[in-house]
Image: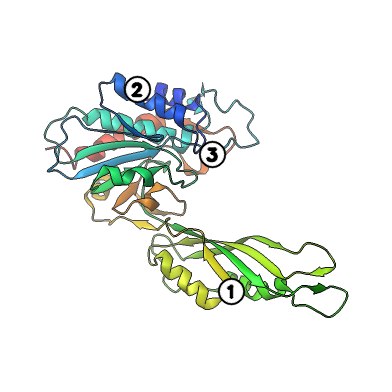
């Protein structure tokens, strides 16, 4: 697969609307592209995957994964988000940077090794759905079908630097109770006032374990809802808390600490999105360092949060461009990304 083919495939994917949960068209396009290359393709829902030609069940498995769904176009777009346009070395279009560039680069990597014999690792390429919403029909729906995975490269825009750690996410729905009453009289119990000490706890509490890569656990109250009329003391105050978890804690430990700290109802929406970490001594990290790549901790979430095995997040593009209006990726980033992926794997999977 030539670099130009990767860019042409990305242009095709940009032209196909593929919001999370609505990726049927882009899944079809990826499957057709692989089949034209003579690759046997498997599909479940809108997830598409393939194995290297000389797959050997006695060897460990390396997963090459990225997603082909997108967020909704930013309202400030000045271009057609589904019209791929190249200007001044930039490819514009929704999903070009997040994560189309990484997806087609990993696909080029997979095809580079597809017909190699005697690889030290089997390769499993997977283009998955619903990453942007962490939905149930994405990577978590197909991981049980993959069998044992030894480690993964997760394609996301990192400027081809190595995100060796990534914060997890826990979202809490909290409820403080009061008692309704007339605001003109000294009656009732104001649920907003009952909630205030809880919200102050979230603002002020510090988890003692601080990660060298990811920093401290970060808790932020982001949504508040209470009251119906100006003259009625509210009997309930609901608020939402966004918690970004470092690798020093499990999501369960975070929730238990919160429940001990506040006097309100606390319900986590999910405990699925866990912090992740790969050792600096892992062969793939060492390979990257030997090529001059830097390692860092990423504050943003990806599908690696759902992977119960070591994973490294790395890919062309810049996370700062994700979800912006008039999203773009530089063509040289894709070309250089493919070359770097190959150089990294050459050091660990070839005999």
**Disc 1 to disc 3, C-alpha distance:** 33 Å
- The residue at which mark 1 appears reads as 201
Vertical comparison of 143 with 251: above or below? above
**Mark 3 — residue?**
71
In which image quadrant can residue 221 be found?
A: bottom right
Circle 1/circle 3 CB separation < 8 Å:
no
Residue 177 location (% of width, % of height): 67, 73
Q: Nearer the viewer, mark 2 or mark 1?
A: 2
Residue beneath the point at 42% across and 64% down: 251
Going from N to C along the chain, the mark reached first, 2 or 1, is 2
Numbered disc 2: secondary structure? helix
User: Which residue is at the front of the view, 39 or 243?
Assistant: 39
* Residue 206 visible, this orientation: no
**270 is higher (above) or lower (below) than 283:** below
Q: Residues within 10 Å of mark 3 (few under 14, many from 20)?
A: some
Q: Could you classify mark 1 by the number of other residues whose Cα lies within 10 Å: few (under 14), some (14-19), or many (20 or more)?
A: some
Separation of marks 3 and 2 at Cα, in angstroms: 23 Å
Say which quadrant the N terminus sits in.
top left
Identify the residue position indicated by label 2 in the image: 33
Within the image, what quadrant is residue 208 found in?
A: bottom left
Using the image, tell me which numbered label, if any, was put on residue 100.
none
Query: Disc 3 or 2, which lies upstream in sequence?
Result: 2
How dense is the environment of label 2, judged by Cα within 10 Å: few (below 14), some, or many (20 and up)? Answer: some
């Amino acid at each position: 697969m030539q670099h130009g083919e990767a860019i042409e495939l990305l242009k095709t994917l940009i032209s196909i609307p593929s919001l999370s949960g609505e990726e049927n068209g882009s899944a079809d396009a990826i499957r057709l592209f692989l089949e034209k290359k003579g690759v046997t393709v498997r599909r479940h829902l809108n997830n598409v995957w393939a194995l290297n030609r000389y797959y050997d069940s006695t060897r460990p498995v390396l997963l090459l994964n990225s997603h082909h769904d997108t967020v909704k176009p930013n309202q400030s777009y000045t271009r057609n988000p589904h019209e791929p346009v190249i200007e001044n070395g930039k490819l514009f279009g929704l999903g070009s940077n997040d994560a189309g560039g990484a997806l087609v680069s990993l696909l080029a990597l997979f095809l580079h090794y597809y017909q190699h014999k005697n690889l030290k690792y089997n390769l499993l390429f997977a283009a998955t759905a619903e990453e942007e919403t962490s939905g149930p029909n994405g990577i978590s729906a197909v991981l049980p079908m993959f069998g044992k995975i030894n480690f993964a490269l997760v394609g996301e825009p990192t400027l081809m630097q190595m995100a060796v750690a990534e914060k997890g996410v826990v979202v809490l729905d909290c409820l403080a109770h009061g008692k309704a009453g007339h605001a003109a009289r000294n009656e009732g119990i104001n649920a907003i006032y009952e909630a205030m000490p809880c919200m102050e706890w979230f603002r002020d509490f510090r988890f003692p374990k601080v990660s060298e890569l990811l920093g401290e656990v970060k808790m932020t109250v982001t949504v508040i809802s209470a009251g119906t009329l100006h003259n009625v003391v509210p009997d309930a105050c609901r608020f939402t808390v966004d918690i970004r978890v470092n690798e020093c804690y499990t999501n369960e430990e975070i929730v238990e600490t919160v429940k001990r700290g506040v006097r309100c109802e606390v319900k986590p929406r999910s405990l699925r999105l866990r912090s992740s970490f790969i050792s600096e001594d892992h062969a793939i990290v060492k390979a990257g360092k030997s090529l001059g790549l830097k390692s860092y901790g990423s504050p943003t979430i990806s599908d690696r949060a759902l992977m119960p095995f070591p994973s490294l997040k790395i890919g062309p593009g810049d996370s700062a461009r994700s979800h912006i209006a008039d999203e773009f990726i530089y063509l040289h980033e894709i070309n250089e990304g493919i070359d770097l992926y190959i150089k990294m794997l050459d050091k660990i999977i070839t005999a």
